[in-house]
Amino acid sequence: MMILKSIAALAWFGLAASGADLRNAVIVAPAAAPGPEQKAAQMLSEEIAKRTQIRLEVRRTAPADGPAIVLGTAAELGARAAGLPAVTAGADGYRVKAVANGVTIAGNDARGTLFGAGYLLRHLRMERQVLEVDDGLSVSTAPRYPLRGHQLGYRPKVNTYDGWTPAQYEQYIRDLAVFGTNVVELIPPRSDDADDSPHFLLPKIEMMVEVSRICAEYGIDVWIWYPAMDRDYSNPATVEFALKEWAGVFERLPRIDAVFVPGGDPGNAEPKYLMALLEKQTQNLHRFHPKAQMWMSPQSFSEAWMQEWFEIMNRKPAWLTGVVYGPQVRMPLPELRAKVPAQYPIRRYPDITHSRQSQYPVPDWDLAYATTEGREVINPRPTQEAQIFHLYEKSAIGFSTYSEGVNDDVNKFVWSGLGWNPDTPVVEILREFGRYFIGERWGDSFAQGLLALERNWVGPLATNGGVDTTLEQFQAMERTAPPQVLENWRFQQALYRAYYDYYDRARLIYETQLENEALDRLREAPRTGSLVAMAAAEAVLDGALTRPVAQWARARVFELAEALFQSIRMQLSVARYKAIATERGANLDTIDMPMNNRGWLTARFAEIRKEPVERERLKALDEIVNWTNPGPGGFYDDLGNLTRQPHLVRGAGFANDPAFFQSSLVGFGLRSQGGAMLNEPRSWWDDAEALYEAPLEMVYHDLDGFAQYKIRVVYAGDSPRPKIRLTAGNGIEVHGLISRPVPFQPLEFDIPREATAGGTLDLKWYREAGLGDAGRGLQVAEVWLIKK
């Protein structure tokens, strides 16, 4: 099949094969065709017209002569299906073949016919007044995994979906169906979110009904992510309230295939009470949708609750259909699969939408990106998403992804493509994405651009010259693109990221240079005096405000933000576009976050000026200048900085451990986008962290075995509640469980001599064991090992 697809792709570029002209074709669907087949015919006609200005008529019978695209199941097609390739068994499968006078699409079932039409759309050559199919097109296929879905919730925090009409929802569901998506997951009116959005065009329940109706027409399965939000399900009155509330939703929706209840995030019900509730909710669900399934996940469970849940699962509750593996499950998927009784299938719920503080964060993300582009940035990560998919694919029957908007649009299509055929090269999925959504001539160049955007985030930003090349490549496309492409929201998204990344790098290089110059001014303080030195340093640092760089790129980012709001209702600013919060994708509001220590230095200068004694002022400035100097025989690590963490033990790494269960990861202590954070050193804005019960480890070699050492450490991060303890050597305690000080500050502890007597020091930090949450809290920003 892959060879045939490659031949077809070559044909579109005029390199091989020949194409049959379909401009005068008609689309033929059986007169009594079920809904998905009717939608398949409509979809073909409308999507072809959008791309070619050619509207193909939909008929119920084939013409006596002239080309036709005939679709239906094999039983409906009869003799027309005789010359097709052999059937690949499986639900949703199809066969598509270019025949003497058109194309035949034969679904294994009605939804398979829809997906076959999607395959044809992806492989037609469509340009203005051009509609051709490769003469050699022939495929028989069925999906490897039965669940291939995405969450499309209508709620305020999703940044984009809350501004959509039912027609926009239908278009997006159709887009996903073209690439084989068979599940759409909805969110009920009450969840962990605001009650209203200024963008809502319909009440939550009304839009939920509309999307369920649309999915029913296309034959797409409808799941509901339904969090158990109430405080106490041991209280019968609470249970009765929940049964009545959920029934009100179940009754309204025309189609529900499954309900998925997360154990946490949100929700905080003890397993025995949660599972008792869900048994009753299953009966409640079956009153309105008798065949609908009930699934749940053990998200956010403490170790004790996890063991309680396993005990319940081992009793094999008959009402439960399956288990969902999502964020904040405290063990890797293969381990969960091994512990859950085999009768329960597992579905994945991968977070494809967040770039930090998430299930699968961007590995080693640069602080400049984390502070400006933020957690819900436009985030094409095609090769990384493929790694995540493949690593755990055999432990589950499929997926429905966790999404908070269209920032993760590319990732959805990567998952859908791999869910159908895991052997498909990612670049081929991206080329089909580019050809179908951007245009025939843009397929490969847009695909390569998406891969380049992913590479922009690899390694330290300051030394990643590929960022500049990525923008140049997109600018070349931008200069030659017709208006239809420039107005295409998917093209606008890629441009937005390319310009934003470039602006970040230009500012980082410039503001780092300004900080270095400012520190040089401070080093002159013993000669010039402290007050003169601070004034000179401030004047240099102010260059970021008075002489900013790359303003043309910044202006283009703002233009594209406006274009994205108009084209797809993407809310990239709280003030301008009424996004619900800065952290919910509104990264236009953080585009000018400092790239150096200007905020901290300015705050320190204000404090130092209050000191009346010059000697003390000079001492304070010397401390700033020598902040990273551990003294003779000492060592310094900035654990959030890839270039300054030589003693950190990294572990298995993203390729083998993308959820970082047994690896250290770069984390971020961005408790806010301003305020106190700006007055702290940037080295406290990021950190190294380990999750759950895994230790964070540092190893030093070639120490002086006769010397006494001490450690100076800063415990920072975004989760200050869990306590931390530190051991050295073979479990020698340096300090027991302690709470980190807030505001953050350096702490000092002596290292027992026996821990360094052999010339090697192994430090291990642990957080409190057994907690039920996201696993974070063991977060170390800076470490000085000082020889006393």
Image (cartoon, helix red, strand yellow):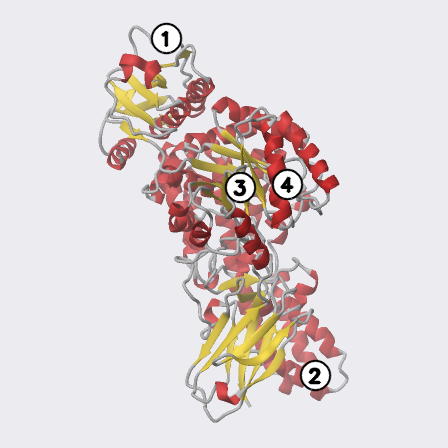
Q: Residue 277 — which label?
A: 4
Please identify the residue farthest to the bottom as the structure is shown. 706
Q: Identity of the amino acid at label 2?
A: Arg
Q: Nearer the viewer, mark 2 or mark 4?
A: 4
Q: Pick the residue in front: 581 or 256.
A: 256
Q: Which mark is residue 317?
A: 3
Give the CA separation, mark 3 to mark 4: 13 Å
Q: Residues within 10 Å of mark 2 (few under 14, many from 20)?
A: many
Direction from residue 321 to residue 473 in the image, left or right? left
Q: CA distance from mark 3 to mark 1?
A: 50 Å
Q: Which is nearer the N-term, disc 1 or disc 2? A: 1
Crowding near the residue tagged with mark 1, few <14, some 14–19, many ≥20 C-alpha atoms within 10 Å: some
Three-letter code, disc 4: Leu
Where, quadrant-wise, is the C terminus in this rendering? Answer: bottom right
In the picture of the structure, the residue carrying the numbered disc 1 is 61
In this rendering, is residue 555 above or below 481?
A: below
Residue closest to the eye, 350 or 373: 350
Amino acid found under the numbered disc labelled 3: Pro
Which of the labelled discs sits on residue 617, or is there none?
2
Q: Earlier in the sequence, mark 3 or mark 1?
A: 1
Which one is nearer the viewer's eye here, 86 or 450?
86
Q: Position of residue 76 (x, y in %)?
A: 35, 14
Q: Secondary structure at mark 1?
A: loop
Which of discs 3 and 1 lies nearer the camera? The answer is 3
